[in-house]
Image: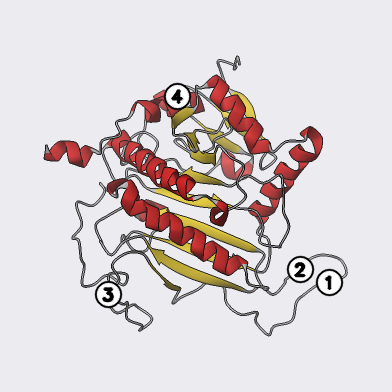
Amino acid sequence: MTLPAGAHRRYNPLLDEWVLCSPGRLQRPWQGQVEAAPPGQLPAYDPGCYLCPGNARAGGARNPPYTATFAFDNDFPALGPAPEAATSEPADGLLVARRVSGVCRVLCFSPRHDLTLALMSPAEIRPVVDAWAEESARLAAREDVVHVQVFENKGEMMGASNPHPHCQVWATAHLPTLAARRLAGQRRHFETRGADLLGDCLARELSDGTRLVCDNPHWVALVPFWAVWPFETMLLPRRRVPDLPSLASEERDALAEILSRLNVRYDNLFGCSFPYSMGWHARPADGGEHPWWRLHASYSPPLLRSATVRKFVVGYELAAEAQRDLAPEEAADRLRTASERHYRAEAAR
């Protein structure tokens, strides 16, 4: 397909929103904030870490001497049992407040304090994939849960409170705003076209090729046509799968493999432990089939020009609409050409 050479807008049918794309704007001089250099190599075990095996957590509980993945209820959860406070539903529809309830879990990827997914082998990542699926299935089976969100914040720049490799799993009795928009976008396309939206997008991307990063027989990593973050990517299964528990064993193996490859590419892009926020998007846990929903993961990394210069979501983006300075096709090309051998492994040779 032919794209405009200059500034243009791209439509995101998944969220029903637009993004302003301004290719070439990265050439402008930068005299703004520069982040501190990422920390050096961490120890394999940190006696002061709340997540390392055997250590006491901030809430007082002590971690078992775990040797693989380890999940527990968050000691400081954002959600819990429904509070007693009354719901506010004024007749004029203004100043509405509703009770919410949920469960917040923490999942450690490894007992090693110094690892990330980029530094773990596919064999080491596979138990993480299984743990994501197990946590999702267990929480989705609860009668008081309609949505399960798996997400990882990696790096201080993305608000990670602890460098130990871990993610969070939040289960809620309500469908969150962005999940509801993803549901509406996929359902709208299905009812109009008779096929799932992300499946049709995947077919187009495989045919075009310019936004592909890497793939294997079961998964594809690509930069979405409508990406907002500079090096945003999406992970898509080739088979329409609605959620993590529905993945077959070979698909889980392949997912572990492509997670390793993608995360290594991220680290190699700027020679640093690449920060990001990653989220899995599965069908609602309301008992419905939702034939329009295809499981997918989104990576939203902030780095823009280097390991110390990031994208800021401010100004026009807060007041008007999302905007990016780097064309998705260029971002995909840079990720696609990045090595799949980690820069730390190269330095050790």
Q: Sequence-wise, which precedes: disc 4 or disc 3?
A: 3
In the image, what residue type sits under mark 2?
A: Val
Residue 184 as seen in the image, left or right of residue 77: right
Frontmost residue, 227 versus 238: 238
Mark-to-mark CA distance, 4 and 1: 50 Å
The residue shown at (57%, 77%) is: 80
Mark-to-mark CA distance, 1 and 3: 52 Å
Q: Residues within 10 Å of mark 2 (few under 14, many from 20)?
A: few
Q: Identify residue for label 4.
A: 330
Q: Sequence-wise, which precedes: disc 4 or disc 1?
A: 1
Judge whether 81 appears above or below 297 on screen: below
Q: Sequence-wise, which precedes: disc 1 or disc 2?
A: 1
- In the rendering, which numbered label is found on residue 245? none
Mark-to-mark CA distance, 4 and 2: 44 Å
Q: Are marks 4 and 1 in contact (CB under 8 Å)?
A: no
Q: Residue furthest right?
A: 91
Q: Identify residue for label 3.
A: 65
Q: Identify residue for label 1.
A: 90
Frontmost residue, 304 versus 242: 242
Mark-to-mark CA distance, 4 and 3: 45 Å
